[in-house]
Amino acid sequence: MDVGADEFEQNLPLLQELVLGADFVGLDIEFTGLRSSLSEPHQISLFDLPSEWYLKTRRSVQQFTICQIGLSVFSTIEGESNKYVAHSCNFFLFPTTFGILDSEFSFQASSVQFLNQYGFNYNKFLKKGIPYMNEEQEKKIKQNILAGDWRVRSSLDKDQIKVVIDEVTRWLDPAEEGDSITLPGIAGFQAFEVQLVLRQALPNIWTAQREQGVVVKKVSRQHRWYLEHTSCDRASCWKEKILLSARGFSVFFQMLVRAQKPLVGHNMMMDLLHLHEKFFRPLPESYDQFKQNIHSLFPVLIDTKNVTKDIWKELNFPRVSNLSEVYEVLNSNLNPTKNSGPEIIHANKCEKYVDTKCPHEAAYDAFLCGSVLLKVAHLLLQRAHSNSPATEPSFPQYLDMLAPYVNQVNLIRAGVPKVNFSGPDYPSFRPPVLILSVARWPGVSEQQVYREFQNLCKFDVRRLTRSQFLLLTNKFKDARNVLKEYRGHPSLQVSLYRYWRHAPDVKCLLQVCGIVTTWALLAFFLGRPSP
């Protein structure tokens, strides 16, 4: 089901009911851009500590925005054995533009091209996107709305507002008290703003929102005063409606937070960064504060990328590169528990994915995340109880099997492979750092070193001295291959990096100590009296 601004508010009560009754929620997000530095290893690299990775990525999250959120709400079916129903929804989002709020964001050409390839509906994103804001933005707009400060920038084009005012003014002069006119084609959040401007500009009219559009009625000033102070449409209620409409998807985000359901994603670190920035608060400078905030919002996170990466080799499954391939393997005969695993059905009005594959459509990927979670958890449960009598699995049992992976989120290209949101990060288990000493290649740069090795394997490169570079990969076999391939090379000497031997600060310290020791010995011998 695709949800834009027009459908969102009317479906909000149903969405809240679904989340409250869920076992867990699958999540996927599409963005207008990712980190350009993913393709530039000298910027985001395996050398980065998680805090360094966070600060670099934080800047790009502030630069781009969310264009689509996919949620797949999984619930057990009462009275059915190990059977789940999934409600999958695509939410098209667009930042709130009202009053003082007018967000700026960038498009990354490669991201636009990628989403176009998979049929992303940019028209719905740009024209029908659900507004949203974080808590800081909400405070600013609330102060303006409740203070009655309407002299702010309009989210509608100023020319459009002028056309509306001119039309109503021309009608108003000959109209009699009690006459009305309908302004068609104005709905949703824009309808609030049109009424806002008209009520402020014209003291002898009253407005109302109807299915056919905004209705403007000519009234006396006395009747206008009466309506403002006694009707259910009085200013205070109306302002609250404006605020609710302006908050948009942020209202549902708060419902999701309050529900405290397990949140499941695949390679979900970027998703969490954007959730924090767009719906909660601007990302803090402190990496530890970010972790604490996310853990308070979502106490149970499960990243299926981290889970499958950890167990895939142990299960002797073929190597796969993306979520769709993981799902296919678990649905194939390679999975020994394929026929005994949980049954997953699609809810009414969510049958799009029954026979249709829609990779990189957010709701489809969210559904795959939830399905992978259940299938992997069932596989782990069956292996753990292989010698015990078969019992009907329950979701709490599945969660017990996944306990070692809870709040462990995969981290791409950093000094550690995952982030622990419920405590300190675990130490990295990476291949050793290599040191490259360059001879007869004056002025060599990090990019040139990277290109030298890229055909053999992928290394992140960091300059150590004028003629020395550190090399780091996430594959042990790549480190071994380079040591073997460049053994005896005439101008490129590669060896294992040893801090106490190669670090410039240590070498400098040893040199200073050597000089001090030498002078001390000279002073000692020269200062001795002759026999």
Image: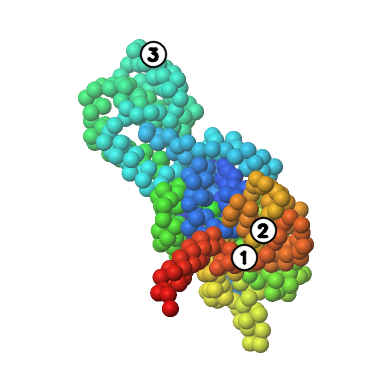
Indicate whether 194 appears above or below 415.
Answer: above
Which residue of the protein is positioned furthest toward the top in this rendering? 174
From the image, tell me which residue sits under label 2.
436
Q: Secondary structure at mark 3?
A: helix
Q: Is residue 79 left or right of residue 240?
A: right
Q: Callout 3, which amino acid?
A: Arg
Residue 150 image-quadrant placement:
top left
The spot of residue 501 in percent (x, y) is: 58, 67
Indicate whether 523 appears above or below 47.
Answer: below
From the image, tell me which residue sits under label 3.
170
Q: Residue at x 54, y 76 (%)?
A: 400
Viewer-proximal residue among 298 and 478: 478
Q: Dot 1: few (<14), some (14–19), or many (≥20) neighbours within 10 Å?
A: some
From the image, tell me which residue sits under label 1.
497
User: Residue 438, can we see it?
Assistant: yes
Q: CA distance from mark 3 to mark 2?
A: 79 Å
